[in-house]
Image (cartoon, rainbow, N blue to C red):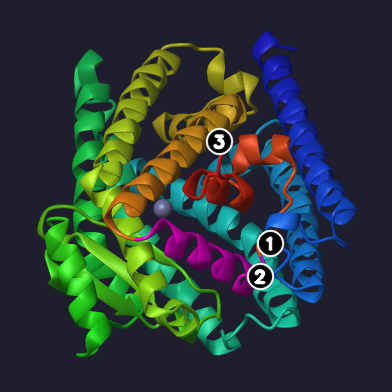
Amino acid sequence: MHFFTALFAGALLIGLALQLWLLRRQIRAVRAHRDRVPPPFAGAISAADHARAADYTIAQSNVASAERLSSAAILAILTLGGGLAAVDSWTLTTGLEGLPRQVAVVMTVLLLALFAGLPFEAWRTFRIESRFGFNRTTPALFVVDQLKGLAVGGGLLLPLAAYLLWLMPRAGQQWWLWAWGAWALVSILIGWAWPRLIAPWFNRFHELEEGALRTAVETLARRCGFEPRGVMVMDGSRRSSHGNAYFTGFGRTKRIVFFDTLLDTLAPDEIQAVLAHELGHFRLHHVALRIAGSLAAALAGFALLAWLARQSWFQPALGVPDGGPHTLLLLFVLAAPVFLLPVGPLFAWLSRRHEFAADRYAARHANARSLANALVSLYRENATTLTPDPFYTAFHASHPPALERIARLLPAPGK
Ligand SMILES: [Zn+2]
């Protein structure tokens, strides 16, 4: 056995064990605190709501465990089990040749990965979200969403894959720099076009209705240097009753989006505080920083890919004895996450820092008490657990736990 086969198998197993262990810890932490609302929330969240959030988190964590197991098994089958090699030799019988055949292999494997994830997504939507009263997605809408997602994903990924596969044998030693350039261009284009061109295909967006709230929102946005027309409401209620708000895009497409469900839940001062938090993400350049970070990571990724392309052991060690550039690309995309598992917590930590920074910005430009109240309402309405496991949070959470956020927003007197 090649050393890299052993390394990959070991990393895959250790990674899977780590993820399942973290999910077990999360379930245990939530279950242990299920019957007692943490004191700071005692007045705001009822025992019944708290127990419901625990049950919801446990149900989600159980599906996540099953999904981790399934995707590790599929990854092992595709690589060491010879699945990718089988798909590759199957396409030789279809009469396709050259670049079209290579693109067909990439497409087949991406479709397989998509189908493997579908049962879990359907389970989450129609069993868990329905059981806890969140789901409003009909089976028809679910199917349409999947098809649209496939069209968007395929429309973006396949031309990019075809370009990379065309480039690799033609652009000489420095092909990976050209490849990264194309990648960067597509990423920036998507970041720019998503809010205006792609998101409206899935949801309807409109401006806030005229009235006191809109006036207040416009004043606050202007004061923070944000074009008020960029504040939009989205019909999130089409799919679920979860409420949320986010900041996206850059340049002239930047937007702050409120789910209609969030506007129904929160009081006007709380909505302004949430807006101030999103404005914080805008003023502190969090979207641009995230894109810059992912472009730097992609540059390192392409450099590594170019090096691996010259290593004759790489593909055979992962179950493809005589592959081409297309199987190299697929093996890289499949295997990289296994080795990148330790990077996840770093990005989660950065994301949590951004959330704290946006909270501080909101406390300066709106009302810290209102933001804390808004957070409590959102935690209650979304059935988000108040008592996550600290290890699980450190590893996965993009947002800090409620207790920590509120403790920083409203420091206890004397501290
Ligand atoms: Zn945020």
Mark 2 or 3: in front is 3
N-terminal of the two: label 3 or label 1?
1
Residue at the disc numbered 3:
415
Residue situated in front as seen by the camera: 53 or 342: 53
Q: Is residue 208 visible?
A: no
User: How far, Cα to Cα, is label 3 from label 1?
Assistant: 19 Å
Q: Position of residue 167 (x, y in %)?
A: 24, 32
Q: Position of residue 294 (x, y in %)?
A: 34, 35
Q: Is residue 392 visible?
A: yes
Q: Main secondary structure of the magenta part?
A: helix
- What residue lies at 70% left-to-right and 23% top-to-bottom? 11
| Callout 3 amino acid | Lys
| Callout 1 amino acid | Phe
Task: Look at the image and give the residue range highlighted in magenta.
Answer: 367-383
N-terminal of the two: label 2 or label 3?
2
Per the image, label 1 sits on a secondary structure element best described as helix
Decide: marks 1, 2 in contact (CB < 8 A)? yes
Residue at the disc numbered 1:
41
Find out if the beta carbon at label 3 lies less than 8 Å from the nearest ligand 1 atom.
no
Q: Residues within 10 Å of mark 2 (few under 14, many from 20)?
A: some
Mark 3 or 1: in front is 3
Find out if the beta carbon at label 1 lies less than 8 Å from the nearest ligand 1 atom.
no
- What residue lies at 36% left-to-right and 64% top-to-bottom? 273
Residue at the disc numbered 2:
44
Per the image, label 3 sits on a secondary structure element best described as loop
Residue situated in front as seen by the camera: 85 or 30: 30
Extreme residue in the front direction = 414
Q: Residues within 10 Å of mark 1 (few under 14, many from 20)?
A: some
Q: Please state, as top left, top right, bottom left or bottom right, where the N terminus lies in the image.
A: top right
Residue 307 covered by magenta stretch: no
